[in-house]
Amino acid sequence: MGAAMRRIHVGNALSAFGLGFTVPYLYVYVAQVRDLGAMTAGLVLAVFAVAALVVLPFAGRAIVRRGPRPVLIAALVTAAVGALSLGLAGSATSVLLSAAALGAGQAVMQPALATMIVDCSSADTRSRAFAMQFFLQNLGLGVGGLIGGHLVDTTRAGSFTLLFSIEAAMFLLLAGIMATVRMPQAPQVEDAPQAAGGSWKRLLGNRAMVQLCVLGFVLFFACYGQFESGLSAYGVEAAGISTSALGTALAANTAMIVVAQFAVLKFVERRKRSRVIAAVGLIWAVAWVVAGYAGLGHGSKTMATAAFVSTYALFGLGEAMLSPTVAPLVADLAPSGMAGQYNSAFALVKQLALAVGPAVGGPMGASLHAPYVVTFLLFSLSITYLAIRLGRRLTPVQNQPSLGKSRVVAQGAPRHPVRDTSPAA
């Protein structure tokens, strides 16, 4: 890991640490602390999604033309302004405008950081680089949320202002760190404005990338889009899970990622990416079966709680398998110099899934318990099907990068074995 990659990872951990201070408490802050009501709090969450959908189509073009670092710094400054404004906002209008700035900045940060990781890594190190990013994100979010929970006080608006100020400071600190990163010379796209302008057509002509985007939508819709909406509503309404047990389940998800990430990485690196994603679909199908037992079975409340916590842990295992698989695959499918465009497109798909997922899963999880479990069980199985189909579109090295490494070693090896005559032999 070079100096540039180390700084990227440190900055990524700091930004996640800052986000952890505010993400769990945003709804309570808007609805209760600022006394703006549940409707405004819901609109704030919607504004985050809308802002991301608006800026992401332009983010890829900016990254291609300007490079990922200046785009990331601009996004971080925007997010810092939004976070600080949100901590000081007292009216519905100021809250929504602040949320729009914060959401837009956060959305652009994702593809810009991913492109910097791509530019600072090789095909051999990329899976580990993205696994480290995901590990540090979850660790930062968990630690930030834990500390924020001890600082927050719903009777004092000032305590929330402190949390948002810390978040803004972390964004600015990350911007400062990124300004010192020496990026390697990335391949430039000839005639960048025209190339970027027509890059969406070029991307849509890449059948493997289109299939990966469809698969990505299902992945984020069936998992991430349910964590804080449908699945939590299902756990409370169907399984009778307490709010403290729900917090334990979320902690189990993070703990599984932190503990299993690098053990899973060794398993993933030597296997076909399409098969790894297909296995994740099966693991998540088992998770939904366990969730079905938690809410629809006739066991004790203790058993239901244990099953529900296990569901979140199984989702975490799948996430740990995806982090070194999907993001590097997006980079490997991108033509030279177009990684920013492809990362932005995939981030756009993710945001669409995260916007649609709660809207569909929330009402179903709260009232249609059996149909909810069956629906997302089928979505998980469809992940396996789509992953197998995607594997047929990938080249052998795109599907399993270790093959390319082994071929290089084989080509460079001597034709006849050389005998070792050293004393150690």
Image: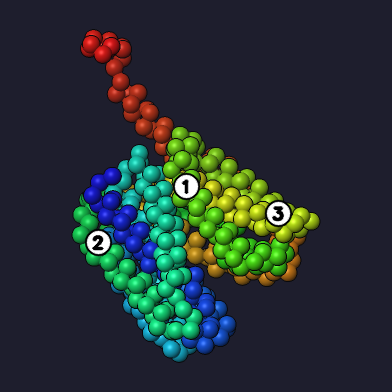
Picture disc at residue 61: none
Q: Position of residue 385 (x, y in %)?
A: 62, 45
**Of pointers 2 and 3, the one earlier in the residue sequence:** 2
Picture disc at residue 259: 1
Determine which residue is flagged by label 3: 303
Mark 1 and 2 residues: CB-CB less than 8 Å, in contact?
no
Q: What residue type is labelled 1?
A: Val
- Residue 185 versus residue 299: which sits nearer the camera? 299
Which residue occupies 46% across, 40% down?
263
Q: Position of residue 278 (x, y in %)?
A: 58, 43
SS for callout 1: helix
Which residue occupies 34% across, 76% down?
165
Determine which residue is flagged by label 2: 177
**Of pointers 1 and 2, the one earlier in the residue sequence:** 2
- Residue 35 versus residue 98: which sits nearer the camera? 35
**Of pointers 3 and 1, the one earlier in the residue sequence:** 1
Relative to residue 259, is residue 230 depicted above or below? below
Q: How crowded is mark 3: few (under 14 residues within 10 Å), some or many (20 or more)?
A: some
